[in-house]
Image: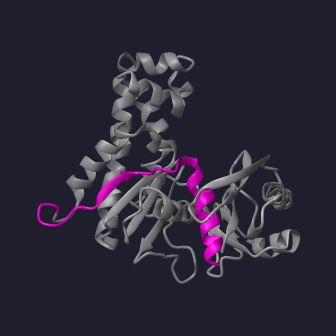
Amino acid sequence: MGLTIGVDIGGTKIAAGVVDEEGTILDTHKVPTPSTPEGIVDAICAAVSAAGKGHDIEAVGIGAAGYVDDKRATVLFAPNIDWRHEPLKDKVEQRVGLPVVVENDANAAAWGEYRFGAGQGHDDVICITLGTGLGGGIIIGNKLRRGRFGVAAEFGHIRVVPDGLLCGCGSQGCWEQYASGRALVRYARQRANATPENARILLALGDGTPDGIQGKHVSDAARQGDKVAVDSFRELARWAGAGLADLASLFDPSAFIVGGGVSDEGDLVLDPIRKSFRRWLVGGRYRPHAQVLAAQLGGKAGLVGAADLARQG
């Protein structure tokens, strides 16, 4: 199969891109993300039509944040869109006249990294995305593993602290409450409140108060050596690395790929994640260690991965 279109549904924009067999994006079109479920379907179709103009498109892949059924057709539940058993595949196919595959956005990003990014050369890869929350994807034996009902790899909602922090999913102690962009900001605010003398750079980047600290402030301050910001990254990395050690016990991959906005800080966060992973890996002194790699495709991974999954049908 030749050219396909990948669609990435973001909180503020929907991006559609024409992708070739090498994972190269040839053309893109972006539209604002509407506020209603039906508006989002309209926007997806408009973006696909605009991006595909002048190209011979054979299929469309859509990355959606939510639980997608085993047939890759229906969004069973989307936390940020009012989709409940939404027949997204059928609705878009009827409008654009092309075969459509719907996939969880983290799965799509994992597949993109496996095929065209940091996962090349590996048969068994586990991907995690450290963004606002924590998502992931499983590739074992060169295949994307979705589980019997299509909703595997929701790593962010593994409970790591019994009766811990309340999560947006309704449970308590989920991994993403301790290893995510939200967690990073919480750590920084707590530390800045307790020891403001160690957070002078960090506080100055915001409005001068702990509550004014945002994720970009923590990153900027850490690069300038602010103690609270650096310690906050280390705390996030401690939880992230410990979680990877648990996943190694489950899947034994040759590589972990760490993506998402938090990972954009490179070795500032990846080095302490690697250290924590080695610390908590059971039998680590006697067994091979998976590599912990930085994602390479950045924000393009989901779009490219969705397009490639559509190519495979």
Query: Which percent across, then down, holds residue 3?
Result: 69, 66
Residue 266, image quadrant: top left
Q: Is residue 112 magenta?
A: no
Magenta part of the protein: which range? 284-313
Against 254, residue 201 (above or below) is above
Query: Which percent across, then down, holds residue 160?
Result: 38, 59
Q: Is residue 305 magenta?
A: yes
Q: In which quarter of the image is the C terminus?
A: bottom right
Residue 164 appearing in the image: no
Q: Which residue is drawn at 37% across and 71% down?
A: 124
Query: Which percent across, then down, holds residue 312?
Result: 61, 76
Question: What's the image's color scheme?
Answer: one colour
Observer-nearest of 30 and 236: 30
Horizontally, residue 60 falls left or right of residue 291, namely right
Observer-nearest of 77 and 10: 10
Residue 196 appearing in the image: yes
Q: Which residue is drawn at 49% across and 36% down?
A: 185
Observer-nearest of 268 and 60: 60
Against 133, residue 148 (above or below) is below
Against 3, residue 313 (above or below) is below
Horizontally, residue 111 falls left or right of residue 288, namely right
Observer-nearest of 225 and 85: 225
Q: Quadrant of the N terminus?
A: bottom right
Q: Which residue lies furthest to the bottom in this view?
A: 148
Query: Which percent across, then down, holds residue 196?
Result: 40, 19
